[in-house]
Image: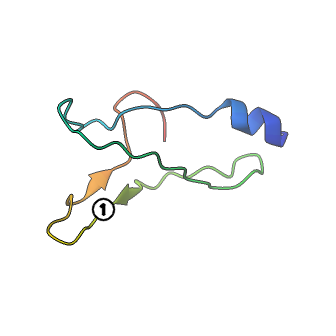
């Protein structure tokens, strides 16, 4: 699959546990590789932390798209 075709699979989705009243928005990009079949079956997650608090574990999943 060409790099251009891989880029065409990209999309933006809010996380499944997103709160609509949140005032800050972040965009993340996760790369697994450009070779055919180089996706992941893992369940990627993240924790954003600041001076006063953190988000806790946020799973990178929107409930619709295959990760």
Check the image and name the residue furthest to the right. Answer: 2
Q: Is residue 20 above or below residue 53?
A: above
Q: Quadrant of residue 4?
A: top right
Question: Is 16 situated left or right of 36 in this image?
Answer: left
Where is residue 52 drawn, in percent x and y? 14, 69
Q: How many marks?
A: 1
Q: Is residue 18 above or below residue 51?
A: above
Give the quarter of the figure containing the N terminus. Answer: top right
Closer-to-camera residue (49/30):
49
Residue drawn at point x = 73 percent, y = 38 percent:
6
Residue at horizontal 49%, vertical 32%? 12
Q: Is residue 46 above or below residue 59?
A: below
User: Which residue is label 1 attached to?
Assistant: 48
Residue at 30 percent across and 62 percent down: it is: 48
The image position of residue 13, as x and y in percent, is 42, 31
Does residue 14 sit above or below 36 in this rendering? above
Which of the 4 image quarters holds residue 33? bottom right
Q: Quadrant of residue 57?
A: bottom left
Residue at 20% across / 60% down in the picture? Answer: 56
Q: Residue 66 location in percent, x, y?
A: 48, 35
Tell me which colouring the rendered structure shows.
rainbow
Question: Dot 1 lies on which element?
Answer: loop
Residue density around tag 1, few if under 14, some if 14–19, many if 20 or more, within 10 Å: few
Q: Is residue 2 left or right of residue 53?
A: right
Which residue is at the front of the view, 52 or 58?
52
């Amino acid at each position: 699959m060409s790099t251009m075709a891989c880029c065409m699979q990209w999309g933006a989705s809010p996380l499944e546990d997103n709160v609509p009243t949140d005032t800050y928005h972040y965009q993340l990009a996760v790369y697994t590789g450009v070779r055919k079949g180089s996706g992941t079956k893992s369940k990627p997650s993240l924790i954003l932390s600041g001076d006063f608090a953190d988000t806790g574990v946020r799973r990178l999943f929107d409930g619709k798209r295959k990760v």
